[in-house]
């Protein structure tokens, strides 16, 4: 098959309305940039034919949803860029089957909720960017099974309290950005289990309570 040895492919800014079928079966492809096109969905039949893929850039498109397991069968994918789309919801198991995913970018979408198990079984995930969405609620176990998560950005959303941020079980988290939400009060109890937290960013108007020496 032609182009089987290509490792990097840039198809950004081409006004594409669908995934090009010509990339099917490019077994050596490690990076593909499809950013700033007009894509509305991710077809389930093309990505599984790209087993070596490590980086997938889909920012600046018109993607509206992440369906169940749409990215599975990409065992080497480490970086997934979905920022600046029109995604409204992250459903259950939307990122299923990505054992080596390290970073996912979902900022500048229209996401209002993150369902339970949305980020389930992602053992290598270190960074989640969800800033500049319309988030009102992140299910408590949406992110809990990410044992190596270090950075979570939830800034510029509509979260009314820390309990809405889905922080349960994030024992390795080092950086958390909750600034520019609707949070008016922060209690030590809400972040007590974040034993490795180094950086916590909140808006200036937030009131604090029960913040002892251990914070």
Image: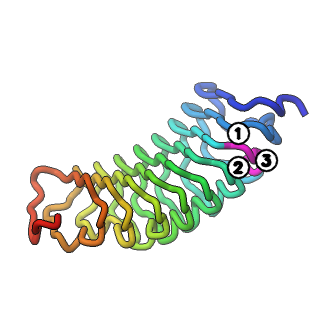
**At which x and y percent is residue 173?**
36, 60
Around disc 1, counting alpha carbons within 10 Å, would you say few (fewer than 14), some (14 to 19), or many (20 or more)?
some
| Residue located at (41% from left, 49% from top) | 129
Q: How far apart are marks 3 and 2 (CA)?
A: 12 Å
Which residue appears at 28% of the width and 59% of the height?
197
Q: Which of 175 and 137 is in front in this view?
A: 175
Is residue 75 shown in magenta?
no
The CA distance from mark 3 to mark 1 is: 13 Å
Q: Which is more N-terminal, label 1 or label 2?
A: 1
Rendering quarter of residue 144: bottom left
Q: Residue beneath label 3, please?
A: 49
Whole-number angstrom distance, CA of label 2 to CA of label 1: 7 Å
Q: Are marks 3 and 1 in contact (CB under 8 Å)?
A: no
Tags 3 and 2 in contact by the CB under 8 Å rule?
Answer: no
**Side (left or right) of 66 relative to 127:** right
- Residue 10 placement: quadrant: top right
Q: Does the magenta stretch include residue 48?
A: yes
Question: In this figure, which colouring scheme has been used for the structure?
Answer: rainbow
Residue under label 1, please give it: 19
What is the magenta range?
47-53
Question: Can you give x and y, in whole percent of width and height, for residue 137 in the image?
Answer: 35, 66
Q: Where is residue 177 in the image (x, y as percent from the top left)?
A: 28, 52
192 is higher (above) or lower (below) than 136: below
Give the labeled residue for mark 2: 43
Picture residue at 73% right of the left edge, 44% below the top: 52
Q: Is residue 45 above or below residue 1?
A: below
Q: In this view, does 74 lie to the left or right of 180?
A: right
Residue lying at 64% horizontally and 43% vertically, measured from the top left? 54
């Amino acid at each position: 098959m032609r182009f089987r040895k290509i490792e990097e492919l840039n198809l950004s800014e081409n006004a594409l309305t669908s995934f090009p079928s010509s990339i099917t079966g490019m077994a050596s492809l490690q990076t593909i940039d499809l950013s700033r096109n007009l894509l509305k969905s991710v077809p389930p039949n093309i990505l599984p034919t790209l087993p070596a893929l490590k980086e997938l850039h889909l920012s600046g498109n018109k993607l509206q949803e992440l369906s169940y397991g749409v990215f599975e069968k990409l065992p080497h994918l480490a970086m997934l860029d979905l920022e600046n789309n029109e995604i409204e919801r992250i459903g259950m198991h939307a990122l299923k089957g990505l054992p080596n995913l390290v970073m996912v970018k979902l900022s500048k979408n229209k996401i209002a909720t993150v369902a339970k198990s949305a980020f389930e079984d992602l053992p290598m995930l270190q960074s989640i960017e969800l800033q500049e969405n319309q988030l009102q609620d992140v299910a408590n176990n949406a992110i809990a099974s990410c044992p190596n998560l270090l950075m979570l950005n939830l800034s510029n959303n509509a979260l009314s309290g820390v309990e809405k941020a889905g922080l349960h079980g994030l024992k390795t988290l080092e950086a958390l950005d909750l600034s520019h939400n609707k949070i008016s009060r922060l209690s030590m109890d809400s972040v007590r289990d974040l034993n490795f937290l180094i950086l916590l960013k909140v808006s200036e108007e937030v009131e604090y309570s029960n913040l002892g020496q251990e914070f």
